Amino acid sequence: MATASPREVPTDQANDKRLKILEATMKRHQYRADALIEVLHKAQELYGHLTEDRLLAIAHSLHLPPSRVYGVATFYHFFSLTPQGEHSCTVCLGTACYVKGAMELLAALEAESGLRAGSTSADRKLSLLTARCLGACGIAPAVIVDGNVTGHADPEVMRARVRALLDEE
Amino acid sequence: MMEFQDLQIMAEQERTRRKAIRIHCCTSSGCQASGALELFHQLQAAVEAAGQNERVDIIGVGCMGFCGQGPMVSVEADGVLFEHVRPEQAPEIIASLDGGPCNVKQGDHAHPFFARQMHIVRRNGGVIDPERIEEYIAVGGYQALYHVLHEMSPAEVIDAITRSGLRGRGGAGYPTGLKWATVAKSPGERKFVICNGDEGDPGAFMDRSILESDPHLILEGMSIAAYAVGADQGYLYVRGEYPLAIARLQKAIAQARKHDLLGSQIFDTSFNFRVDIRVGAGAFVCGEETALIASIEGRRGQPRPRPPYPAEHGLWGYPTLINNVETFGNIAPIITNGADWYAGIGTERSKGTKVFALTGKVRNTGLIEVPMGMTIREIVEELGGGTPDGTPVKGVQTGGPSGGCIPEALFDTPVDYESLAEVGSIMGSGGMVVMDATTNMVEIARFYMEFCMDESCGKCIPCRTGTVQMYRLLSKISAGQATAADLATLEQLCHLLRETSLCGLGQSAPNPVQSTLRYFREEYERLLRKRVTINLTSR
Ligand SMILES: Cc1cc2nc3c(=O)[nH]c(=O)nc-3n(C[C@H](O)[C@H](O)[C@H](O)COP(=O)(O)O)c2cc1C
Ligand code: SF4
Ligand code: FES
Ligand code: FES
């Protein structure tokens, strides 16, 4: 249905299934400029983070100036331009969690992992992140480990989980 | 083509296929985090094992509101409510249907937490399976849309919404009917309807719960709005942090399309309406309407000056109606029950109910829907049950980073738009965080300022640099290193931001500081004095 031609793909990536999925997403949106955020979501979901090359390729496909694509990618917190750890642990620091001891929880996890909030371990095993409200305030404090929310999070239990992720082979 | 009769037939079929006993298992986010999915499967297995397949149905339902006590299970008809249910307790629950012993912790419907609520927007929450359109239709769903399309003119719909007194639930409380009327009369080749589901306030999860628990209610509300203002395309802008809400909405849209309740010539009329989802990417400021529009257009989510308002010049320059999730949730009930019914609920100037997320240092955390005008004291003490350990309550924070802290002394303030503004807070979207005597108010103010600093989009200078300066000053105060002059500077900055920022984020960023200064000034001053003491002793 779309008439815009797909971008030329470098041969080493030609068989990359993820690239095909990304292409399909752009095609579904008819390569419209306003689909940029949807496309970036997909790219991040597929690759874990957005590299400069990928942003350039997206700019090309959507007929947008690279500065616009880069500007959007850096504006939104969701998009990451650096690789993330294999696992992630996100501590909610929203108000409801904050008054229920989220800072102590974070301090415990920082101590256990040796990581500062917002950083990734050198072996790329784990990223320790923070968020401001996951919408799970009813069960505060909340922590997300690899996409799964834990409510009423206990510092000792979470410490053990983080340890296990770090020690994983 | 869907006709009124088809709706009724579907509803009837759905009702007859129901088994004698329906057991509701909450599978919304809060309970999922407490292990509800495993419980859901165990309940199904227990029914199977007990040979009760013919009689008992396990239904995955939306949020029951008592999320802090999840996973929640309830038995329809006899109204038994189970809390903190563990998967291994599933057989016990099934056996209890026939009088078997059951040690699962039971909730009490007569408890004020439930008894004092009034459900309009949340009436289907925890009662129907949000993933099946048939269940929504069985409780009368989409009949309001039919009624509107066949029996009311757009002007009559707007008139009904105006007379109901409904005001926007996204924070500012702008009269909904008036907004619809403006969009309806704005000239434009096309018009759009946008549902604001960005819900970025920390401590707020009402919209998430509504979207997860009853997605068709929102689609029906948006459709009625689209008919009233003359739009043919809608967007649902949902936070990226809400994957379950997004998945359920996608499903709901697909089902509505399949049954011709979205698409072309809905209910055999000339009304066409399509809805697409746009997923937010983690920028709080995108909840602001002009920033949200920029984001849907695929740009950086930065606000622009208003006027022109989106009602006249919105998405791609066309007249655009933008309302909050909960606002849309009130529409079908108003059409069904009439404007006068709605106008009879609440206070003089704030009509209907409001959904609040009651969290923090309170015994019963969760979602509540109460008539406007209930006092904060009733909410915190009766519904919320006070603090878990009996520590005195110090205050309650409403309205998130744009709101303020209300001290316990003012808890007899009724919740309505004007009263909350009078005491220096705002209704906001409905987050209510309870704080007890151990909560440090300066830290709370600092926390919100850090939030605003991080979320400032950087477009205008007062907000971009002012939030940084205020955050530094608050950190200095917090660390006991500030002087009275610093406090004075902080207060000046409050005025500056309020007066000169471009959008609501910067304009209201001082609110948490000003309200804590107003009611808990001694906490700030105590920290100032500390410096003097330290200096004297160290010399
Ligand atoms: C910084 C900022 C954030 C906002 N966030 C939201 C939000 O998350 N949800 C929402 O419905 N409205 C939010 N609003 C208000 C919207 O701009 C808009 O007024 C509202 O969506 C209109 O809907 P209503 O009339 O139904 O309340 C926000 C406003 C500002 C200034
Ligand atoms: S007030 Fe803040 S968030 Fe709003 S436009 Fe200005 S810089 Fe951006
Ligand atoms: S404040 Fe942590 S989930 Fe909402
Ligand atoms: S999420 Fe289950 S009761 Fe709220």
Image (spheres, rainbow, N blue to C red):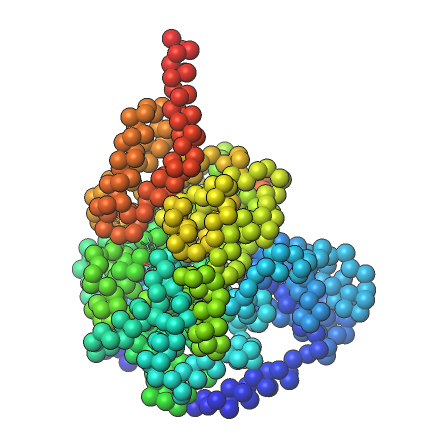
Q: In terms of image quadrants, where is residue B281?
A: bottom left
Residue sitting at 67 percent across and 59 percent down?
B110
Residue sitting at 39 percent across and 72 percent down?
B163
Q: Is residue B274 left or right of residue B489?
A: right
Residue sitting at 32 percent across and 30 percent down?
B487
Q: Does the image show residue B79?
A: yes
| Number of numbered discs overlaid on the protein picture | 0
Determine whether B429 is above or below B56 in the image.
Answer: above
Determine whether B267 is above or below B127 in the image.
Answer: below
- Residue B355 image offset from top left, x and y in percent: 49, 59
- Residue B15 image offset from top left, x and y in percent: 62, 82
Which residue extends farthest left? A65
Residue sitting at 53 percent across and 76 percent down?
B136
- Residue A162 image offset from top left, x and y in percent: 53, 42
Q: Which quadrant holds the N terminus of chain B? A: bottom left
- Residue B189 image offset from top left, x and y in percent: 21, 78
Nearer to the camera, A5 or B7: B7
Q: In terms of image quadrants, where is residue B39?
A: bottom right
Which residue extends farthest front? B348
Which residue extends farthest top? B539
Q: Which quadrant holds the C terminus of chain B? A: top left
Q: In terms of image quadrants, where is residue B326?
A: bottom left
Q: Does the image show residue A112?
A: no
Nearer to the camera, B294 or B126: B126
Picture quadrant of ligand 1 = bottom left
